[in-house]
Amino acid sequence: MKVLHLISQDSGGAGRAALRLHKALLEQNIESLMLVQNKTTDLPSVIRLANTKPQKIMEKLRPALATLPLMLYPKRHKDIFSPNTLSNKTLIKKINEIKPDIIHIHWINNGFLNIKDLTKINIPMIWSLHDANAYTGGCHYVASTCVGVKNHCNRCPLLNSNFKYDISYWTFKAKKETYKKLNLTINGLSRWITNCAKESTLLKDKKIINLPNPIDTEIFKPMNKDIAKEILGLNKTKKNITFGAINATQIDRKGYNELITAIKKIKHKNIRLIIFGSSHGETIENIETIYMGHLNDDITLKLIYNASDVFIVPSLAENLSNAIMESLSCGTPVVAFNIGGNNDMIDHKINGYLAKSYDVDDLANGIDWVLENDCGDNARQKALKFDSTVIAKQYIKQYQNIISNKKS
């Protein structure tokens, strides 16, 4: 069985999750390949699409060209929006050359793939939903003020649009027409996004399953906290509260402002705040704050999780967080809002704390509770349910079912 993963890049949240699944499949002796627009790993089984000089030039231009239609909306929200307007004939040609038995779609934006192009491929497909984009007219999370996505996107609040036939309308229409023609199985990575897909206009008629991302529990595993602190040069007398995300302090939905407010409310005072994913941010009076910048390797992440007494995920929108899974696997409890897929991994007051949705006071309560209660062993035990070997076997079974159904 030959599995081909399609993803814009092998880095970032979705990219790292897809790469972990790819590696787990290789460990199970499955012929797995990843086809990407932006390659950072040196694995030969991860294939960069661009080979020729013109293709490499186009590779650089694609992300910008793909967002050109957004210039029509100068007052749009700063968060990501993918219009799905740019075709990629090179990608389709490469897929047909590889001739996989099944295509596993992940995060395919930044001009990497146009949904319409998938009609040119007669291969069964499974699409893992890393965010909401597959069932929307271009956004990656659905704004609370949105009413269009339940029927047909238009007047998109993220575009700050009051026009019915805006780019969200036409993107939604293109997806609706295309999905009808595809042999496509939808995989909701969390129970929450699985239910969102089942309730969506675009995907409700497709077969929808729920399989999570895997985690390598041999990489992310507990180690002596004092040793981890010593390696990182951290004073051992303080409790470490950690927060990390891509562009942690720049994107509102990551919850940085909520985190800062909660930290100011907690009872514990002999604490240190560690933030990775950004190099700067607010300094809280009398609280040591360390900004670690962007981290790209698992070893440093493992050290930080192990040096932490609690990991905070204050996100206002979340699917199946890599960071939560990584922290739990290292035996570090997590505090997060009870939203999205967080309750797939966090069991309230067992391996962490699920704060009431968007309730900053309860987020502070959760931090205090974890600092007073030892639940690190429970955190590790929960993570073992997502171990890469266990999850890879579940994916292999689904691939086989999808391929068999095509042949029958």
Image: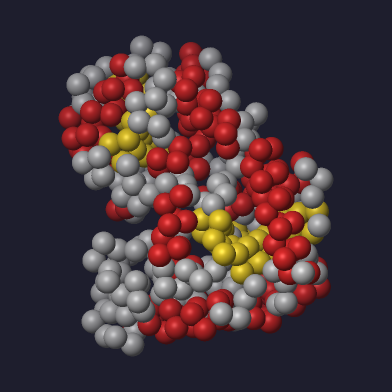
The quadrant where residue 374 appears: top left
- Residue ID at (24%, 66%): 145
Q: Residue 335 at what x, y percent from top left?
A: 35, 33
Q: Is residue 106 visible?
A: yes
When the figure is inspected, residue 16 is found, relative to residue 291, above or below; the finding is: below
State the residue in front, 65 or 210.
210
Q: Residue furthest front?
A: 408
Tally of numbered tags: 0
- Farthest residue, direction bottom: 165
The reply, left or right, for residue 115 in relation to residue 170 is right
Q: Quadrant of residue 33?
A: bottom right
Please state, as top left, top right, bottom left or bottom right, where the N terminus lies in the image: bottom right
- Seen in the picture, residue 125 relative to 390 is either above or below; the reply is below
Viewer-proximal residue among 41 and 340: 340
Compared to residue 71, the image places residue 392 above or below, namely above
Question: Measured from the top left, where is residue 393 in percent x and y?
Answer: 70, 44
Quarter occupied by the C terminus? bottom right
Relative placement, left or right, of 187 versus 96 is left
> Which residue is pictured at 51% across the width and 71% down the height?
205
Residue drawn 79% across the image and 50% down it: 30
**Is 165 on the left or on the right of 395, as rendered?**
left
| Colour scheme of the picture | secondary structure
At which x and y percent is residue 111? Answer: 55, 73
In the rendering, at what x and y percent does residue 263 appear?
24, 31
Residue at image coords 51%, 59%? 129
- Is residue 249 in view from this perspective? no
